[in-house]
Image: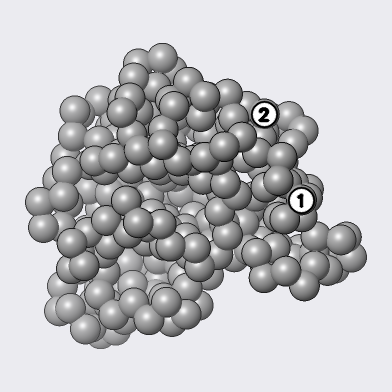
């Protein structure tokens, strides 16, 4: 498997509009962050997307992605689903609806916010998607060419969200709480991706110290921090402070698993 980080920034991205801080003005390409998303390629043939944010079109073009088999949605905040309209290009090329997996809260939100997609229509060219509800209590489910996915329930303040484990990889973003039974699902992962907004505590996202505590408990071979705000600091400076085996992810980073 290969994981490509398509975007590693928060809802505002980095640089933030009208911000003149050192991070937003940095010339280091690792400090330029689109909204958070990642692409998992399995056996060089199956592409599974984690979240489909407002930079989806740009991310697909930048990475030259010409096939997309499934989308795993963590939650329905706009920075994670606002690119849904652009699946129409894959509908046209692949001659099928896009399979989207999500929890009940996200399904309700997408059916409301994108009702023109899910209501009956006779207009050619509109995006097409099949929403598959995942409650998070199932042991696992299968997507695309039989890829087994374990849903990991988490909380984003008061909002239930989903992380996902696929074999040796676990991907969790926008969380600030994992129950002990959900932490158990992460045992044995070799690569953990987890969010950390900034160094200071936040009301709905893990801070960097909190994310490092989760990483310590899970004890993966490698861990990558994503969903990073400009408040975190410069990539080069922050990464030097991290424990062995823990890295700040950046846009375009590819990780072999």
Secondary structure type for disc 2: helix
Nearer-N-terminus badge (2/1)? 2
Q: Residue furthest front?
A: 244
Q: Which residue is mark 1?
A: 237
Where does residue 13 sit, x and y in percent of width and height? 66, 61
Q: From the viewer's side, name the closer residue of 47 and 42.
A: 42
Classify 202 as above or below 36.
above
Which residue is depicted at the point 40% across and 71% down?
A: 85
Q: Position of residue 14 (x, y in %)?
A: 70, 62
- In this rendering, position of residue 170 left or right of residue 193: left
Residue at x 43% of width, y 82% of height:
61
- Is residue 164 visible in the rendered image? The answer is no
Residue 64 visible (yes or no): yes
Label 2 belongs to which residue? 209
Q: CA distance from mark 2 to mark 1?
A: 16 Å
In this rendered view, identify the residue nearer to me: 134 or 215: 215
Q: Nearer the viewer, residue 49 or 245?
A: 245
Residue 71 placement (x, y as % from top left): 31, 57
Q: Does residue 207 appear left or right of residue 179 in this picture?
A: right
Seen in the picture, residue 250 relative to 223 is either above or below; the reply is below
Q: How many marks?
A: 2
């Amino acid at each position: 498997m290969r994981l490509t980080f398509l975007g590693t920034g928060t809802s505002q991205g980095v640089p933030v509009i009208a911000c003149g801080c050192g991070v937003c003005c940095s010339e280091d390409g690792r400090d330029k962050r689109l909204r958070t998303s990642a692409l998992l390629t399995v056996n060089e043939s199956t592409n599974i997307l984690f979240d489909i944010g407002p930079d989806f079109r740009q991310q697909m073009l930048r990475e030259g992605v010409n096939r997309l088999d499934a989308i795993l949605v963590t939650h329905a905040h706009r920075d994670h689903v606002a690119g849904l309209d652009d699946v129409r290009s894959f509908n046209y090329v692949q001659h099928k609806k896009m399979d989207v997996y999500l929890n009940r809260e996200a399904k309700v939100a997408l059916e409301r916010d994108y009702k023109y997609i899910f209501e009956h229509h006779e207009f050619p060219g509109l995006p097409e998607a099949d929403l598959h509800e995942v409650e998070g209590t199932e042991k696992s489910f299968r997507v695309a060419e039989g890829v087994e996915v374990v849903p990991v329930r988490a909380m984003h303040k008061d909002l239930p969200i989903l992380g996902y484990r696929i074999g040796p990889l676990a991907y969790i973003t926008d969380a600030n709480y994992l129950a002990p039974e959900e932490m158990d699902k992460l045992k044995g992962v070799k690569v953990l991706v987890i969010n950390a907004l900034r160094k200071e505590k936040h009301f709905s996202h893990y801070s960097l110290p909190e994310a490092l505590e989760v990483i310590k408990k899970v004890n993966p071979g490698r861990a990558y921090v994503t969903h990073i705000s400009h408040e975190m600091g410069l990539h080069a400076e922050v990464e030097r402070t991290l424990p062995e085996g823990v890295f700040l992810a950046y846009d375009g980073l590819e990780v072999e698993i």
